[in-house]
Every structure is written in structure tokens, then in C-alpha cells.
Image: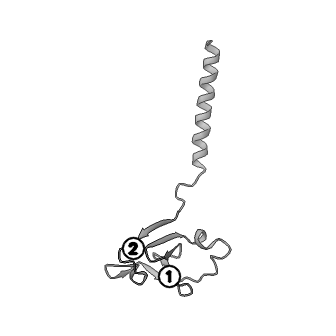
Amino acid sequence: MSLIKMKALLIAAILLVGLLAMGSEAIPSNRWSCYKKVLKDRDCRNIGITNGVATMRPIDSLQNHFWEGNKCDMVCYCNFSELLCCPRDVFFGPKISFIIPCKPI
């Protein structure tokens, strides 16, 4: 290969790596996702209580659904063997999530 072709390939590779690096910054790294927790006693009535402090609050209008934490950002569903928790907009969808009432602590 000639020296000119090698330089052109090197410049193209550097530009490609630079473009890939810039593109990764556009994706939010703090995006919330869903997760599951296995329930030890398989009882939805006792979830959310850690050392006598409530960490989850039941959603009044939905059976086996809970708000996680002090805010109303995460929703959890208990199905007897595991707890599925997702961001509010992911769980209910953006058109319905604002209808479900929640009072932050």
C-alpha cells in the first residue's frame, strides 16, 4: 500500500472513532429501567417494610401495586414470587401515568 492510502485509512478510522464517541454522549446514561426482586416469603402483604420502616406504599386504586421510595417515580407490581418495578411512565404508559394518584412523602 502506498503511504497516501495508509494515511487516508488512518484519518478515516480516527474520524469514525470520533463520531462513535460523540454519538454515545447523546444517549442518556442515567435512564431508568425495570428490575425484578425475588420475594423470600412469597407474600405481597409484607413487602416494602425494611427494619420497621415502610419503603413502599400501596397504590389505593390498584391491588398488589406499590409506589417505591419517597417520590412517585417507580411503580412495583407483586405477583407472589417476585416484585417487578419500573419507572411510572414505562409501567403505565405516558398517557395513563398522570391519572394514577400519588402523594409524595
For label 1, count other residues whose C-alpha is less than 10 Å away and answer few (under 14), some (14-19) or many (20+).
some
Q: Where is residue 45 in the image (x, y as percent from the top left)?
A: 41, 84
- Residue at 60% across / 43% down in the picture? 22
Question: Which secondary structure lies at badge 2?
Answer: loop
Looking at the image, residue 36 sits to the left or right of residue 10; the answer is left
Query: In the image, which disc is placed on residue 64?
Result: 1
The residue carrying pointer 2 sits among few (fewer than 14), some (14 to 19) or many (20 or more) residues within 10 Å by Cα, namely some
Task: Kindly identify which numbered label has been placed on residue 74.
Answer: none
Instruction: Say above or below: 36 vs 29.
Output: below
Q: Mark 2 points at which residue?
A: 39
| Residue 12 image offset from top left, x and y in percent | 63, 28
Tell me the CA gap for discs 2 and 1.
13 Å
Give, as a three-letter code, the residue at label 2.
Leu
| Residue 94 falls left or right of residue 60 | right
Q: Report the number of numbered marks.
A: 2
Q: Are marks 2 and 1 in contact (CB under 8 Å)?
A: no
The structure residue drawn at horizontal position 43% and vertical position 74%, both measured from the top left corner, is 81
Name the spot of residue 59 as percent of width and height, x first: 52, 83
